[in-house]
Amino acid sequence: MTRTTVLIKNLTRNRLRTTLTVLAIALPMFVFTMARTMVEQVHEMLAESDLKLRVAVHQKLSFTSPLPQRIREEIEGLAPEGYITAVCRTSWFGGRIEGKPAAFASMAVDRDTFAKVYAEFEITPAENERFQEERRAAMVSPELAKSQNWKVGDRVTLTGSLPPNPKMEFVIVAIPPKMSRQWFYFAMDYYDETLRKLTGSPAGVNNFWVKCSSPEARQWALTAIDKHFASSENETRTELESTFFAQFMKSGGDWVGLTWNVGRLIVLVAVAVAFNTMSMSFRERTREIAVLRTLGFSAGKIVRMVLSEGVLLGLIGGLIAVGPIYALTHLTEFSIPRMGTMQIPNQTAAIALAVACLCGLLAALVPALMAGRLKVATALRKVV
Amino acid sequence: MAYIELQGVHKVYRKRNLEVPVLAGLSISIQAGEFVALMGPSGSGKTTLLNLIGGLDSPTRGTIRVGDAQLEQMPERELTAWRSQHVGFIFQMYHLLPVLTAAQNVELPLLLFKMAASERRERVQLALSVVGLEDRSDHRPSQLSGGQEQRVAIARALVTDPQMLLADEPTGDLDATSAASVLHLLERLNSEFNKTIIMVTHDPKAASHATRQLHLEKGELFADKPREAAMVEY
């Protein structure tokens, strides 16, 4: 027998209470793990986006107010030779399948520059050629194709979510393997033509994505474009891609911040519940702790014993919270709506386990100090 | 030189502004190998005296020497270490850990020593055989009778081979047969193993097993009799 044996035996003393305490730690830690993973995923996406040397140019007041299509030529003509690789116009379509809620993002893009501006999708020349040739061509991400059971050659009808809510038929010409999350891209000229037929007006542009050739060129774009359009009827705001996406996400409510705050708040709940249980357990065992002190266990050893019990409870709770979801996301293509494929990062798993242990430690701190300060003779007198 | 020497020991408990004197200038000498019964009415200071001799509490005034250790001068940490090596405690309610088996309960004090697991097991088996419970080593306290539980508690007190055993009403919660068995065991530990035993008891029959009886009243030594004299009175 070792002191660890005593520790484990103590945890099995009241199995129901131990189970409930472990669950009280595990559930909040599960929420914490998921929240941190989502937040990390967003931050990772934002950090990655800055490596792509793209800037977003949109209407100064809001990216929801469209700009005219001709701005593309102006931007292209503005840049010094070799600064801009390509400019791709994008218009939000917000398409949905008849009778179903919108579960993915759909966007009209320029046929000729899409593959250059979004080079990370690694669209093959053959795929790109099909995208140029087919008037109703659409490219979809593998994740979206899988969720909708689509394959190349399928015809898909979507209805736009913005007035005049055009109903458009598309032909899936490619499912580029590197295209991430749930995206649906189709040709801007097809969208423009449809809108002109329905309303007589051309399609407006939400964003001009400017692919720069170097960090210096990007720095130039961030100031020169806005300067050029200043005081015009189409004043622009040029932003880093990460800044644009961060604002875009905040425009629907700061769910990233909210998620993270809820994740942290819920850890406090775990500490409070575990503290209550540890205090109850300590009160019940005052007599036993006094006996241990009598046998020669020092105050320090008793404090360490109670703290270890708290940490062990936290660790078990943490393993229950993190273990299954970690395995699930690493062994399968686990995805959640709107977030796409999810994988619990090793660092997040390690942090969640550490936080769970810390919860147990904090919860056990006061009971441990009380146990350490116990007056043996007084405690024994109460029970003898 | 006496093994235990108390000189002018006072103990006063303070409850808010109220001072409650429990021991009033007690001076006692106990030789190594004596079996002493501490008797007296409730509140006479028996348990307090036992706690002071066992280093569980400190005197308000006076000196307590046990062997070479001057207890009133020792800091808490040293007292704790000293207790683990020199004192075995036996309580009225046994105070075994319910989640551990008899053998594990006996092994508990040995976890404080650097000792090989095999040596620990040997010592535990020896202690359990001394109390006649080697066949109950895997039983939990809830699977033992009161008398058996107390014998396990005695084995736990013995396992570190301390010179002194302090027993606080060890038969107070037992039926007559179990009480007799425990008292015979204590007598044997005193006579065969030369343990110095101090036993608090209300029961004159239990006290008759001791070689000396100390009677306390209101914190003072009222009578100090050898077994023979006490037997005549009983």
Image (cartoon, coloured by chain):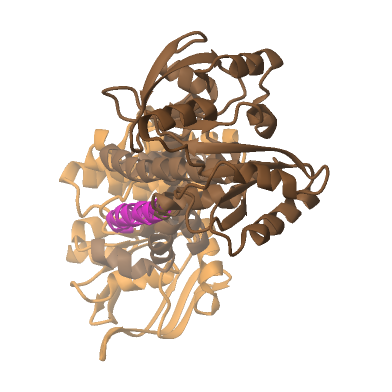
Question: Residue B185, how many percent across, how many down?
Answer: 34, 45
Question: Residue A219, how many percent across, how many down?
Answer: 74, 55
Q: Which residue is nearer to you in this view: A70 or A147?
A: A70
Q: Colour of chain B?
A: orange
- Please determine whether, in this image, residue A120 is positioned above or below residue A217: above
Instruction: Indicate yes or no whether the magenta region holds residue B94.
Output: no
Question: Residue B48, how many percent across, how many down?
Answer: 32, 73
Q: Colour of chain A?
A: brown
Residue A210 left/right relative to B26: right
| Residue farthest toward the right in the current orientation of the protein | A81
Question: Residue A14, how many percent across, how many down?
Answer: 28, 41
**Residue B75 quadrant:** bottom right
| Residue farthest toward the front in the current orientation of the protein | A200
Q: Which residue is nearer to you in this view: A383 or B194?
A: A383
Question: Residue sitting at 63 percent across and 30 percent down?
Answer: A114
Question: Residue sitting at 43 percent across and 32 percent down?
Answer: A196
Q: Quadrant of the C terminus of chain B?
A: bottom left
